[in-house]
Amino acid sequence: MSAVMNEDTRSIDDLIASQKPGYSLDQRFYTDPAIYELELEKIVNRNWILAGHVSQLAEPGDFKVLNVGRESAIIVRGQDGNLKGFANVCRHRGSLVCLESEGHADKFQCPYHGWMYDIDGNLIAARNMPDDFDMQSHSLNPVSVDEVHGLVFVCFTDQPLSLEGCKRDLEEPMAMFDFPNLKVAAQKSYEIPANWKLSIENYQECYHCATAHPEYALMHTLMLDRDKRERVQGTMLERMQACGVKDLYVDFIDTAARPGEIGYGYSRTALFNKYKTGSEGGVPVAPLLGKFSDYDGGASDFSFGAFSFLLAYSDHVVAYVFTPIDHNRSNCEIFWMVRGDAEEGKDYDVEKLTWLWDVTTHADKRIIVNNSKGVHSRYYQPGPFSGMERAERVYIEWILQELQRP
């Protein structure tokens, strides 16, 4: 049998139906523009995406811009103090209105022809228009915005999945870290020349950690298989109660199965004994968060829908947001969050705070790009998942399920 693959002429439905359980996806899921278009419609524009933290939008006029695929949103604190979201598209001839990634504004002016909007999205100036021109009917189009215990999410549809279960079930674990009173200490973007699913699949599994991430592997027991990891959880579990935190668990598989809701999850995993947090040497890098009275030697994983993932240590939180740019490029946005009253230079050093997940993400980018190059080869064929790739398997099964959704 030749290793060279023949051109695949199957329909997308037939391709999904032929997916072998327990194996990686067929090549076309990463290379076919038609499948990417279907993903935009049924997954990307339908799911909530983390845009930042409320501390970045504290005052009326504070804004951020979120770019996802072909869409762009302005998230702004309105005059009434509430968060609002608008499509970053001028109602005149479609130019992007806001070209800055974040800042403060009293109004937004389209750089093309000068149409002007207030921070509530209302059109307030449009030169040389006919006498019967209706200003009110040309406000910026709204996009969905919501807050989950201090985290700001955006969805590019007016009928988004419900966040109510997420808010309820994650209230207690998020309260342990006092999420509403955190602040963003650093934020970095990493463009990855690979399909967005390859970027997220890589984040979902730690089968690669021992090989690709020696800095991470020194301290995180998540690199172990499940049986070995269970055996080293004991020390952390003994310390958790004394440190003011609870042993909680929310299964993403269960929540993702609820129709009409976003999938979400939470768990806490031990670090190896001598490490307190995710830093060089495992030494503290910021003041303890929320209810933590000491370091319990653990790290918590949060997941929010298809694109947003958090790693919460006792003294800081790292948020990962993966989004498509086009079918061959994706973006990884990372937020490092610390206690809201922590002072840079006194309570934390940005370079030390960001070191682990900056070096890890650069390494991830290299292995994702290598993965993408191989996936594009005519010799690529789907391979079997290991026992340490359970979350990745669940994720791609969910992707296939969503692509078949009516």
Image: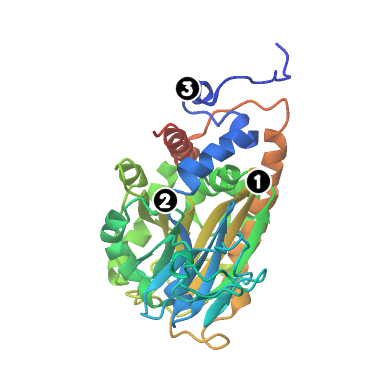
**Residue at 72%, 18% in the rendered image:** 3
The amino acid on which the numbered mark 2 sits, given as a three-letter code, is Gly
Q: Is residue 38 above or below residue 277?
A: above
Residue at numbered disc 1: 368
Mark sitting earlier along the chain (2/3):
3
58, 300: nearer the viewer: 58
**Residue at 59%, 43% in the rendered image:** 198
Q: How is the image coloured?
A: rainbow
Instruction: State yes or no: discs 1 and 3 in contact (Cβ < 8 Å).
Output: no
- Residue 235 lies, in percent from the top left, at 37, 60
Which SS class for mark 2?
A: loop
In the rendered structure, the answer to whether residue 292 lies left or right of residue 320 reads left
The amino acid on which the numbered mark 3 sits, given as a three-letter code, is Ala
The amino acid on which the numbered mark 1 sits, given as a three-letter code, is Ile
Q: Is residue 341 above or below residue 203?
A: below
> Depth-wise, is mark 1 or mark 2 nearer the camera?
2
In the rendered structure, the answer to whether residue 295 lies left or right of residue 325 reads left
Q: Is residue 284 visible?
A: no
In the rendered structure, the answer to whether residue 216 lies left or right of residue 234 reads right
Alpha carbons under labels 1 and 3: distance apart: 26 Å
In the rendered structure, the answer to whether residue 182 lies left or right of residue 223 reads left
Residue at numbered disc 3: 17
356, 152: nearer the viewer: 152
Report the quarter where the C terminus lies.
top left
Crowd band around label 2 with a 10 angstrom C-alpha radius: few (<14), some (14–19), many (20+): many
Residue at numbered disc 2: 305
